[in-house]
Amino acid sequence: MTTPFKQHLIDPEICIRCYTCEMTCQVGAIEHDANNVVINADICNFCMDCIPVCPTGSIDEWRVVAEPYSLEQQYEWEEMPVQEEIAAPQGGSATDVEVYDKAMADLLADAHSGVGGKSVAPARAAKPTVNMYNLDRPAEASVQGNYRLTAKESDSDVRHIILSFGALPFPVLEGQSIGIIPPGTDENGKPHLPRLYSVSSPRDGERENFHNISLTVKREEHGVCSNFICDLAKGDTVKVTGPFGATFLMPDDPDARLLMICTGTGSAPMRSFTMRRQRTVGNKSGGMTMFFGARDADSLPYFGPLKKVPESLLHTHMVFSRIPGAPKEYVQDRMMVEEEAVAELLADPNTHIYICGLRGMEEGVEKAFNNIAESIGTQWVALRDTMREEGRYHVETY
Amino acid sequence: MLDLINVSYDTQIPNNVGLSEDKTVLKALEKWHPGYINWWNDLIPDKFQQSLVYLRTAVSVDPKGWAKFDYVKMPEYRWGILLAPQVEGRTIPCGEHMGKPAWQEVPGEYRNMMKRLIVIQGDTEPASVEQQRFLGKTAPSLYDMRNLFQVNVEEGRHLWAMVYLLQKYFGKDGREEANDLLLRSSGSEEAPRMLGAFNEETPDWLSFFMFTYFTDRDGKMQLESLAQSGFDPLSRTCRFMLTEEAHHMFVGETGVGRTIERTCQVMNENGITDPYDVDKIRALGVIDLPTIQKKMNLHYTLSLDLFGQEVSTNAANAFNSGIKGRFLEHRIDDDHQLKGDTYKVWDMVDGKLVQHEVPALTAINMRLRDDYSRDAAGGVGRWNKLIAKMGVQFEMKLPHESFNRKIGVFAGHNFDPEGNLVSGAEYDAGMADWLPNHADGDFIQSLMVSVTEPGQYAGWISPPKVGIDNKPGDFEYVKLHMA
């Protein structure tokens, strides 16, 4: 059986036949006749050079296909064909481009389950690219750096990993995840499946305009992939799939307010959001609030850099549960202390909420939201459902 | 090493030509800069100068850095000098010097011809901004207002591009010409812009869409042929400008399309099947299709005049000397020198319209005009598909190239839009159906109301199918300055 893949196409109803894409394409994959401009699936290498130069957006069209549409078929089109039902490689069916990599989709769906319904992207989020690279055709990245984020004394080993894709296009948005394929095979002798990690860098790169990607990875005892990643040295190469995720995204609106609640490596997407905002609005105004929980300062990833982020950009509450001589404090406890501020955020239709971390945090955070919503005379579940449907409530836990 | 891909901001003028190391040109440009800013500030109403507009700016000339979108106040837009990367070993693509290395400096013998071409091209850029200066006040949506301003700032940048060439390669003469580009003004009695179509008003948004579709398309064809120039800096400048020009084509094609779509939709909603039931259709606040056809007749024919005389020795000289190529010269399969080739052109013989073959070299203008007409017909076909899809019985049609012409062999004769020679009386009688009159203009003007609520559109035009930069329908493309 042929593996379905994503075919790059042009919407003939939107395209104005300026042929700018054709002039831009370095590999000659785009051509036209008197009717349409079309893309040769055998030649297109997904370099994405044609996307920004298109004045109409008609070139940002994709269909998952078992057999690619031929040039002749595309020349005949008056409108885009609908997405066909495609049997996903792992069995089952997928009608949607976003979920055809079923294993990854299932993982993400599970991570998002705490949201209490179908996740929706923020109305003003940029359009994410998904599933560019899969198991059959992974991207190769080289390691640019591997830094320990937690103190030497801490028994928690969290790493900041920087990956470079060189000339290979790998467009990610803040909040998206990528899959890392650990080398070797599992106990049944099959190659390992990729593990998902949230990117912790903004879309234009860990270093601005370098389009490199950073990850925040915690070493887990016996963890096949996390140990592989945490042991990577500069110059090593890794196989990467993705990007994945089309809902846990930030709104492209400098005035949107973000309430971010995270623990441990759940800080990865929050870091990418914060950096994105910092690069787009500078230090002027942030409108971002974060509740960040860890055992102690030594085990809180990015503790040092975080302290340097101006309060005007990001209002940070660091919450510690294992400070000797102090009572245990969790993120939900601090939310209750900051009840008024949280309530004010909940009441603002411009607020977007993001929760990311260990599954265990969900219950406590939900409870805090319940209490705070009640204090302003609102029923939390109803508010949450509204916010979710409006793309303003996002949960990713594992 | 000089970075020729990424835009450098080490001088006041963003550029990828190593301006900071070229003191003479930098000084000349810095002297010209305040005059440009004054020109811009005097032109665009203050309210819009202070507004935040979601514009794209290039941070590099490769596709990756080409379109970065962000909010910017227009006077702070990063106008600059951006040339497409130099192609190693590029040769002169046509004419008698074909095959020799492309010139990096202006050859003395062609200096004046080259300067004139650059000045004429440069003159059209600020002219269109002048023609469109009041449209912001009646924008049918924030989306359209953004598109207008994007077109405006990029026309401004195109002026910069031409001024750079003048100042870098043409010494004192070039500096004087650069200054004059800011002195002439569209529609002015004393110092009008050089080409006729650029002294016409753009009084309403349908005119703007028609202008960007038909007249900017002439600009596109001229840029395409200058992009083939043997003078490499001119070629590289024009190649980069073409990517920007595509956006202007887009604004025109979708603008007219959305106007047509809305008219058909309102006709359908009200059970009107006769597209010529003009009064009834106008009473519903949309522009009837026959009026749109008349606007098209006007703007298409005005734009045809921009191509000059059908048979022209100037054009032949420009081609033969390798200064200006043909549309997509590199894709044409011939000797690129036109030795012995002929081309069919129109002529008037004994009061009759005939076509005959002339040496192809002298028919360069005619050929470019034919390429233009083919290119322009494409969008008209797509508008017709839209009309058919909505179930309305009407077909838009480009008029015959002889209709309403002021330049070339057809000038001074009366042709109807089908290309039939008609008497003066017949011509006068037909005019009401062929070209927009004052009453048509007044009606269109009456629909021009400013809509500034994000996601809302004036009643005479449909929303676009896709947002700019993939933005959702209610995106606030312009954050209006409220003062």
Image (tube, coloured by chain):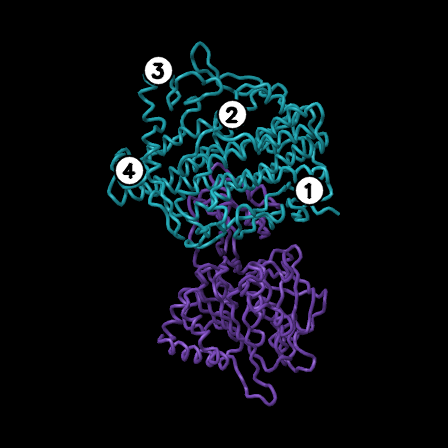
- Give neighbour class at mark 2: few <14, some 14-19, many 20+ (Cα, 10 Å): few
Precedes in sequence: disc 2 or disc 4: 2
Marks 2 and 4 share the same chain: yes
Q: How many marks?
A: 4
Q: Which residue is mark 4?
A: B282
Residue A69 visible in the picture: no
Chain assigned cyan: B
Q: Which mark is residue B424?
A: 3
Pointer 3 and pointer 4 on the same chain: yes
- Whole-angstrom CA distance, mark 2 to mark 4, is 39 Å
Q: Residue furthest front?
A: B483
Image coordinates of residue A335 in percent, x first then y, are 48, 78
Left or right placement of residue B348 versus residue A276 in this view: left
Rounded to the nearest whole Å, what is the CA distance between mark 2 and mark 3? 33 Å
* Chain drawn purple in the picture: A
* Chain of residue at mark 4: B
Spatial separation of the CA atoms under disc 3 and disc 4 = 30 Å
Labels 1 & 2 near each other (Cβ < 8 A): no
Q: Residue B190: give its label.
A: 2
